[in-house]
Amino acid sequence: MRGLSLVLLIAAAPAWAQGSGDNAAGTCIIKPHVTVQLGSAVSGMLSSTSVDRGDTVRRGQIVAQIESSVEQATLALDRMRASNDSAVKVETADMELIAREADRKKFLVDKKIAGLNSLDELQTKLREGELKVQQAKMDQKLAALTADRSERALALKQIRSPVDGVVIDRKLSAGEYIYEQTSIMTIAQIDPLNVELVLPLNRYGSVRTGSSATVHPAAPVGGAYAAKVEVVDPVIDAASDTFGVRLSLPNANRAIPAGVRCTVDWGDDEPVHR
């Protein structure tokens, strides 16, 4: 039974844990830094897509557009209302007229020519005029806020890439309906790349965040590339006595494809491509 348990444990262990010591300690796989299933915050009919599989995209670039003719018309109307200050000008002119009448009436009251009641009536109208001017200004501010809300609603119909990367799959085309849970396309960030590595327990403590290493992609890519440790898992896998390590591998010229297996050399005697 003990022999059978040992056989089962070895069979259950991953391939990297069954190899020889050196190979098991250095075998890795190169993955995208981030893979995004790009969706939408709102539902609607997809009116256009501006990228396809294999295209390079920049962060913030519009890659798809949901039909938004109503939102565009609403935004134009709200902007016009926000820029229209005629109500403020009219109320200001009325208030200034009442203010001049109140000044003249006060002069007559001081001369005992007019009664105080007529002056009090004009001063009340003046106060009402000031409040109307304030209300007109507030209405214009509210119109500006409404225009801002309409602009944000329109922006939700523009699907932008959240990362610099490459399109690896496009699932929807113009004319198809998108729901909030639907993925339009998949974008992978491949600069930098993640190098995922599993090391035996006896290496724990010798590899630290910031440590340097040389990554050797498998053929036909080949070469040697400098990388740095980004993550050292703080939890050990008890079943295999191993722990995970992630290295960050710069890939500015996209010379290294994601998905390639590799080996990692922790020495510094290898030539390194930069």
Image (cartoon, rainbow, N blue to C red):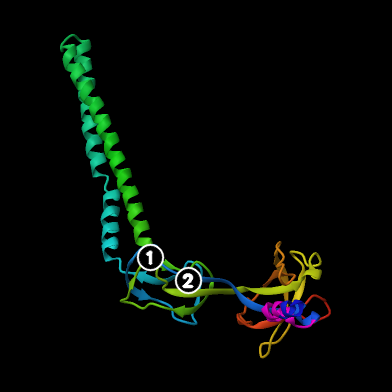
* Mark 2–mark 1 distance (CA, rounded to whole Å): 12 Å
What residue do we see at 30% from left, 54% from top?
Answer: 79
Q: Outermost residue toward the bottom?
A: 220
Q: Badge 1 is on which residue?
A: 180
Q: Is residue 87 covered in magenta? A: no
**Quarter location, residue 254:** bottom right
The image shows residue 61 at horizontal and vertical percentages of 46, 69
> Which of 107/24 is in front?
24
Label 2 neighbour load within 10 Å: few <14, some 14-19, many 20+: some
Q: Is residue 150 above or below residue 245?
A: above
Question: Is 33 on the left or on the right of 149, as rendered?
Answer: right
| Residue 185 visible in the current orientation | yes
Per the image, label 1 sits on a secondary structure element best described as loop
Quarter holding the C terminus?
bottom right
The image shows residue 29 at horizontal and vertical percentages of 66, 79
> Which of 141/259 is in front?
259
| Residue 99 visible in the current orientation | no
Q: Badge 2 is on which residue?
A: 37
Question: Is 212 on the left or on the right of 64, as rendered?
Answer: right
The image shows residue 235 at horizontal and vertical percentages of 70, 63
What residue do we see at 22% from left, 16% from top?
Answer: 106
